[in-house]
Image (tube, helix red, strand yellow):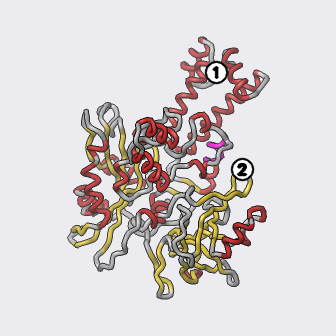
Amino acid sequence: MDTIRHVLNNPSLLGNMYFRPGQEVTKSKEFWYGNVWKESARFGQASITIAQNVYYSGDFVIYRESREVKRPGRILAIIQQDGRLKIKIQRILIFKDLPKNLQSNDRRQRSQEGELWFLDQEMDNAIMNIKLQAIVNQITASILYDNVITNLNLYKIREILYKHRGHWKMRHVKYSYQHPLEFAALEELRISLLIYKLFIDLYYDDFGTFCNVYHLLGGIYIQIGNMPLTERHRLKNHFMLGFVPFGSSFDEFIKLFITEMKILEKEKIMSVQGNECVVIASLGVTTANLPQGNDMVRVKHHGANKGCQTCNMTKASLTSNNFDLQLVSHYHHQSDKQFEQIYVVQTITECKAITAEYGLQLNSPILDQLKRERHLQSSQDIYHLTARKMLRFLKITIEALSPEEKTKFIAVWKSFKYPKNSELELFQRRTGVTQSDHAVKLWLKCWVVMAKTMAIVFKDSFTEEEYDELHECLHNE
């Protein structure tokens, strides 16, 4: 709390900070260009008044897609684009919009009872930015995460239309990330004081900020996401909370931070530049290297059979192109129920079986005491992720060389000749390539793809096309 008070009362810092709606831009660089900021009332704009009616981010509405056509949709965010406020809306489908092969009699009957369908946000034209006057009116809809219908008069949504490997499919809505309105709602303040909403970026670095000095201490520090990237790059704007002492743990150390954040999540009146203001601070992103990143979301470590922070796939299946990521991803509301199952079992054997099935640790994360989506808002340090992968591939490459070639490779660090016959044969069996020269070319192609991926990964800003290019590179890997 003292850090926040210091930052807000520093004119040179406050003057560079951003406190307005999320922005829609071509090249994403700042936190306020991202969906976490745009969609959450804790960071972006929570509501807007249109024709004397108040609409909130997360509301279901009827909007005009054209002069003649009205459609149901959901307000994902209230954004700023080209200097004007717009509504970012997700399309919702009625029965006749579904592909013919998915228009079953059961869905037809459910549509007559008020059921609608989400169009997956990754699909083309699933999300659009519309003008404020395109909103017609609000509607009431219920998302059936648990298949429980509490009001027969409501519109209902239980399925999402999406594409997998070129084919239209349906998945249950429980296999999707919830809107921030559903897990991190913020009651709108009716107050005349100026309001500052802060995006807190928490880092846990097991090697410390100065890794060559604090080699064995876990360094924990925060950044204020309202600062532009140029300011966040400066060491002076990394605010140390401290180091986890020997014999202690992250959970013990972070308790005071959580206590203060709970106060700031609700609101705190502070003196800012000599004026009384309301300060609201919420956890935006947490970042840690492996395996601390998994600990912060209570997923098993990466060495386990199911140790991926993003999804619940087995280690052997992570490189498969066939699995449906949407159906195996970790979702906060799903993990909550899985942790509940772990808590109620009676024996250690049952407990181990459930944690192995879901890829979870025994207890839910201590940071869950704060309002966040544990999986979506917990990124991993990209350096540690990519460096480990590159190191593994480098070791495989070097081990495939003859002793003389190893010496040349290490000395020159540019290229290498043909690998040893035994390693080459193993590589051929893995890839299904029969000719040696083709195998070597494929090996080199792997390095080309890896290099291209790394070049994109470490960009400090992204366009939509560059995100697509990164996705393609990761797929090719």
Residue most toward the top? 403
Residue at image location 44% in from the left, 40% down from the top: 351
Amino acid type of the residue tagged 1 in the rendering? Phe
Q: In which quarter of the image is the N terminus?
A: bottom left
Badge 2 crowding class, 10 Å Cα cut-off, few under 14, some 14 to 19, many 20 or more, is: few
- The residue stretch that appears in magenta: 470-477
Kindly state the secondary structure of the residue where label 2 is placed: loop
Kindly state the secondary structure of the residue where label 1 is placed: loop
Nearer to me, 111 or 345:
345
Q: Quadrant of residue 155?
A: bottom right
Amino acid type of the residue tagged 2 in the rendering? Arg
Residue 377, magenta (yes or no): no
Residue most toward the bottom? 52
Residue at image location 37% in from the left, 74% down from the top: 188
| Residue 200 vertical placement versus 452 (above, below) | below
Q: Mark 1 points at which residue?
A: 416
Dominant SS of magenta comes to: helix
Nearer to me, 327 or 455:
327
Q: Mark 2 vs mark 1: give the one in front.
A: 2
Q: Which label's residue is closer to the chain start, 2 or 1? A: 2
Instruction: Tell me residue 308's x, y (percent).
Output: 51, 41
